[in-house]
Protein backbone atom coordinates (compact mmCIF):
# COMPACT_ATOMS: atom_id res chain seq x y z
CA UNK A 1 0.00 0.00 0.00
CA UNK A 2 1.59 3.22 -1.21
CA UNK A 3 1.01 6.91 -0.56
CA UNK A 4 0.22 9.46 -3.24
CA UNK A 5 -0.35 13.20 -3.36
CA UNK A 6 -3.62 12.91 -5.30
CA UNK A 7 -5.75 10.67 -7.51
CA UNK A 8 -3.94 12.10 -10.55
CA UNK A 9 -0.65 10.86 -9.18
CA UNK A 10 -2.18 7.42 -8.58
CA UNK A 11 -3.32 7.33 -12.21
CA UNK A 12 0.08 8.44 -13.54
CA UNK A 13 1.90 5.85 -11.43
CA UNK A 14 -0.42 3.07 -12.55
CA UNK A 15 -0.23 4.08 -16.22
CA UNK A 16 3.58 4.11 -16.16
CA UNK A 17 3.50 0.50 -14.95
CA UNK A 18 0.53 -0.62 -17.03
CA UNK A 19 -1.25 -1.60 -13.85
CA UNK A 20 -4.96 -1.53 -13.22
CA UNK A 21 -6.46 0.58 -10.50
CA UNK A 22 -6.92 -0.99 -7.11
CA UNK A 23 -8.61 1.18 -4.54
CA UNK A 24 -7.62 4.46 -2.97
CA UNK A 25 -8.81 6.34 0.06
CA UNK A 26 -7.74 9.32 2.17
CA UNK A 27 -4.81 8.95 4.55
CA UNK A 28 -7.20 9.86 7.35
CA UNK A 29 -9.05 6.62 6.61
CA UNK A 30 -5.72 4.75 6.42
CA UNK A 31 -4.95 6.06 9.90
CA UNK A 32 -8.25 4.72 11.20
CA UNK A 33 -7.47 1.40 9.53
CA UNK A 34 -4.03 1.36 11.15
CA UNK A 35 -5.49 2.13 14.57
CA UNK A 36 -8.13 -0.56 14.33
CA UNK A 37 -5.71 -3.15 12.95
CA UNK A 38 -2.63 -2.54 15.07
CA UNK A 39 -3.67 -0.95 18.37
CA UNK A 40 -3.53 -4.29 20.21
CA UNK A 41 -0.58 -5.89 18.42
CA UNK A 42 1.66 -5.85 21.52
CA UNK A 43 -1.01 -7.46 23.69
CA UNK A 44 0.09 -11.03 24.55
CA UNK A 45 -3.48 -12.18 23.97
CA UNK A 46 -3.51 -10.80 20.41
CA UNK A 47 -4.42 -13.33 17.74
CA UNK A 48 -4.86 -13.06 14.03
CA UNK A 49 -8.33 -11.97 13.02
CA UNK A 50 -10.63 -14.36 11.25
CA UNK A 51 -11.78 -13.34 7.77
CA UNK A 52 -15.16 -12.47 9.25
CA UNK A 53 -13.58 -10.26 11.91
CA UNK A 54 -11.30 -8.57 9.38
CA UNK A 55 -14.18 -7.83 7.01
CA UNK A 56 -16.18 -6.38 9.89
CA UNK A 57 -13.23 -4.19 10.86
CA UNK A 58 -12.83 -2.94 7.29
CA UNK A 59 -16.54 -2.25 7.05
CA UNK A 60 -16.49 -0.36 10.33
CA UNK A 61 -14.27 2.30 8.80
CA UNK A 62 -16.08 2.45 5.50
CA UNK A 63 -13.92 0.03 3.51
CA UNK A 64 -16.54 -2.12 1.87
CA UNK A 65 -17.18 -3.90 -1.42
CA UNK A 66 -15.57 -6.77 -3.25
CA UNK A 67 -12.07 -5.32 -2.90
CA UNK A 68 -12.23 -5.83 0.86
CA UNK A 69 -13.90 -9.23 0.82
CA UNK A 70 -11.91 -12.04 2.36
CA UNK A 71 -14.54 -14.77 2.29
CA UNK A 72 -15.62 -16.44 -0.93
CA UNK A 73 -18.87 -15.10 -2.30
CA UNK A 74 -21.79 -17.42 -1.72
CA UNK B 1 6.86 -21.59 25.64
CA UNK B 2 4.15 -21.22 23.02
CA UNK B 3 4.02 -19.32 19.74
CA UNK B 4 2.46 -16.29 21.43
CA UNK B 5 5.44 -16.09 23.80
CA UNK B 6 7.79 -16.15 20.82
CA UNK B 7 5.77 -13.50 18.98
CA UNK B 8 5.70 -11.14 21.95
CA UNK B 9 9.42 -11.62 22.62
CA UNK B 10 10.17 -10.98 18.96
CA UNK B 11 8.18 -7.74 18.95
CA UNK B 12 9.70 -6.54 22.22
CA UNK B 13 13.26 -7.17 21.01
CA UNK B 14 12.50 -5.63 17.62
CA UNK B 15 11.34 -2.44 19.31
CA UNK B 16 14.18 -2.38 21.83
CA UNK B 17 17.01 -3.22 19.42
CA UNK B 18 15.67 -1.74 16.19
CA UNK B 19 15.92 -5.14 14.51
CA UNK B 20 14.29 -8.53 15.01
CA UNK B 21 16.10 -11.22 16.97
CA UNK B 22 17.67 -14.15 15.18
CA UNK B 23 16.46 -17.59 16.16
CA UNK B 24 19.55 -18.00 18.34
CA UNK B 25 18.98 -14.65 20.05
CA UNK B 26 15.31 -15.38 20.67
CA UNK B 27 16.15 -18.83 21.99
CA UNK B 28 18.62 -17.30 24.43
CA UNK B 29 16.13 -14.64 25.47
CA UNK B 30 13.37 -17.17 26.01
CA UNK B 31 15.68 -19.81 27.52
CA UNK B 32 14.34 -22.26 24.97
CA UNK B 33 15.93 -24.70 22.51
CA UNK B 34 16.78 -23.14 19.15
CA UNK B 35 14.94 -25.89 17.29
CA UNK B 36 11.74 -25.02 19.16
CA UNK B 37 12.09 -21.31 18.38
CA UNK B 38 12.88 -22.07 14.74
CA UNK B 39 9.73 -24.18 14.53
CA UNK B 40 7.74 -21.35 16.12
CA UNK B 41 9.12 -18.86 13.58
CA UNK B 42 7.97 -21.17 10.77
CA UNK B 43 4.51 -21.60 12.29
CA UNK B 44 4.17 -17.84 12.77
CA UNK B 45 5.04 -17.37 9.12
CA UNK B 46 2.57 -20.06 8.05
CA UNK B 47 -0.08 -18.26 10.13
CA UNK B 48 0.75 -14.95 8.36
CA UNK B 49 1.87 -13.34 11.60
CA UNK B 50 5.46 -12.74 10.48
CA UNK B 51 7.28 -12.96 7.15
CA UNK B 52 10.70 -14.59 6.87
CA UNK B 53 13.23 -13.62 4.23
CA UNK B 54 12.93 -16.26 1.51
CA UNK B 55 14.86 -19.42 2.27
CA UNK B 56 15.95 -18.25 5.71
CA UNK B 57 14.77 -17.97 9.29
CA UNK B 58 15.52 -14.24 9.30
CA UNK B 59 12.48 -12.11 10.09
CA UNK B 60 11.70 -9.74 7.24
CA UNK B 61 8.38 -8.41 8.49
CA UNK B 62 6.74 -8.54 11.89
CA UNK B 63 3.91 -6.27 10.92
CA UNK B 64 3.77 -3.38 11.18
CA UNK B 65 7.57 -3.44 11.46
CA UNK B 66 10.00 -4.09 8.63
CA UNK B 67 13.49 -5.40 9.29
CA UNK B 68 14.82 -3.71 6.17
CA UNK B 69 14.67 -0.01 5.27
CA UNK B 70 11.59 0.98 3.29
CA UNK B 71 10.21 4.27 1.91
CA UNK B 72 8.19 4.51 5.15
CA UNK B 73 10.46 5.48 8.05
CA UNK B 74 8.60 6.42 11.20
CA UNK B 75 10.08 8.58 13.93
CA UNK B 76 8.68 8.01 17.41
CA UNK B 77 9.80 8.69 20.95
CA UNK B 78 10.79 5.01 21.10
CA UNK B 79 13.05 5.22 18.10
CA UNK B 80 12.88 5.21 14.32
CA UNK B 81 11.33 2.18 12.68
CA UNK B 82 10.32 1.19 9.17
CA UNK B 83 6.79 0.29 8.17
CA UNK B 84 6.22 -2.16 5.34
CA UNK B 85 3.77 0.20 3.64
CA UNK B 86 1.85 3.36 4.51
CA UNK B 87 -0.75 1.32 6.44
CA UNK B 88 1.96 -0.36 8.50
CA UNK B 89 3.85 2.91 8.94
CA UNK B 90 0.75 4.44 10.49
CA UNK B 91 0.35 1.21 12.44
CA UNK B 92 3.58 1.86 14.34
CA UNK B 93 2.33 4.87 16.36
CA UNK B 94 -1.03 3.09 16.57
CA UNK B 95 0.64 0.02 18.08
CA UNK B 96 2.87 2.04 20.41
CA UNK B 97 0.16 4.47 21.43
CA UNK B 98 2.46 7.41 20.83
CA UNK B 99 3.04 10.30 18.47
CA UNK B 100 4.93 9.63 15.28
CA UNK B 101 5.97 11.13 12.00
CA UNK B 102 5.96 9.08 8.83
CA UNK B 103 8.46 10.52 6.36
CA UNK B 104 6.47 9.25 3.41
CA UNK B 105 6.74 10.49 -0.13
CA UNK B 106 4.46 10.33 -3.13
CA UNK B 107 5.12 7.02 -4.89
CA UNK B 108 4.60 8.75 -8.22
CA UNK B 109 6.59 11.97 -8.07
CA UNK B 110 8.70 11.45 -4.97
CA UNK B 111 7.66 14.69 -3.34
CA UNK B 112 7.71 14.56 0.45
CA UNK B 113 4.38 13.61 1.95
CA UNK B 114 5.06 13.72 5.68
CA UNK B 115 2.26 12.42 7.85
CA UNK B 116 2.17 13.30 11.51
CA UNK B 117 0.25 11.57 14.28
CA UNK B 118 -0.26 13.69 17.36
CA UNK B 119 -2.35 12.74 20.37
CA UNK B 120 -4.05 10.00 18.43
CA UNK B 121 -5.02 12.19 15.51
CA UNK B 122 -3.64 12.55 12.01
CA UNK B 123 -2.12 15.91 11.14
CA UNK B 124 -1.47 17.17 7.61
CA UNK B 125 -2.40 13.86 6.06
CA UNK B 126 -3.63 15.34 2.81
CA UNK B 127 -2.62 12.49 0.55
CA UNK B 128 -4.11 9.19 -0.48
CA UNK B 129 -3.38 5.55 0.16
CA UNK B 130 -3.68 3.14 -2.75
CA UNK B 131 -3.95 -0.63 -2.57
CA UNK B 132 -3.10 -2.35 -5.84
CA UNK B 133 -4.24 -5.81 -4.78
CA UNK B 134 -7.61 -6.88 -3.33
CA UNK B 135 -7.61 -8.01 0.30
CA UNK B 136 -8.17 -11.67 -0.51
CA UNK B 137 -4.89 -11.75 -2.50
CA UNK B 138 -2.59 -9.81 -0.16
CA UNK B 139 -0.84 -12.94 1.03
CA UNK B 140 -0.22 -14.20 -2.51
CA UNK B 141 2.72 -11.79 -2.40
CA UNK B 142 2.76 -9.78 0.80
CA UNK B 143 5.66 -7.70 -0.51
CA UNK B 144 3.34 -6.25 -3.15
CA UNK B 145 -0.06 -5.05 -2.00
Image: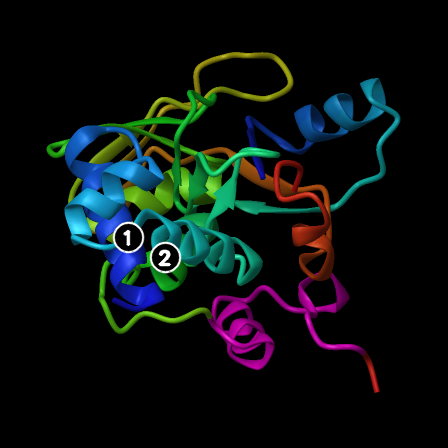
Crowding at mark 2 (Cα within 10 Å: few <14, some 14-19, many 20+): some
Query: Which colour style is shown?
Result: rainbow
At x 48%, y 66%, the residue is: A61
On whether disc 1 and disc 2 are found on a single subunit, the reply is yes
Vertical comparison of B52 with B95: above or below: above
Vertical comparison of A41 with B105: above or below: below
Marks 1 and 2, Cα distance to the nearest angstrom? 5 Å
Q: Confirm whether the magenta stretch covers residue A46.
A: no
Outermost residue toward the right in this view:
A18
Side of B10 relative to A17 (left or right) = left
Crowding at mark 1 (Cα within 10 Å: few <14, some 14-19, many 20+): few
Q: What percent of the width, then of the height, locates residue B49?
A: 46, 57
Quadrant that contains the C terminus of chain A: bottom right
Q: Nearer the viewer, residue B39 or A24?
A: B39
- Quarter of the image where one finds residue A3: top right
| Residue segment shown in magenta | A49-72
SS assignment at label 1: loop
At x 55%, y 37%, the residue is: B128
Q: What percent of the width, then of the height, locates residue B24?
A: 29, 38
**Viewer can see residue B86:** yes
**Viewer can see residue B117:** no
Q: Chain of mark 2?
A: B
Q: Which residue is mark 2?
A: B36
- Quarter of the image where one finds residue B107: top right
Q: Are marks 1 and 2 in contact (CB under 8 Å)?
A: yes
Q: Which residue is mark 1?
A: B33
At x 27%, y 29%, the residue is: B101
At x 37%, y 63%, the residue is: A36
Q: What percent of the width, then of the height, locates residue B1?
A: 25, 66
Q: Nearer the viewer, residue B122 or B45?
A: B45
SS assignment at label 2: helix
Q: Chain of mark 1?
A: B
Amino acid sequence: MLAFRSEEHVDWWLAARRLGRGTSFPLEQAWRLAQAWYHDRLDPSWRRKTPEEAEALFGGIGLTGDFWRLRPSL
Amino acid sequence: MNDSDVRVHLMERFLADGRPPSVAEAAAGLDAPEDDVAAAYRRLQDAHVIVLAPGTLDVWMANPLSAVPTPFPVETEHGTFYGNCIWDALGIPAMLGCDGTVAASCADCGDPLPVRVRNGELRNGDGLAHFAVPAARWWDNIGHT
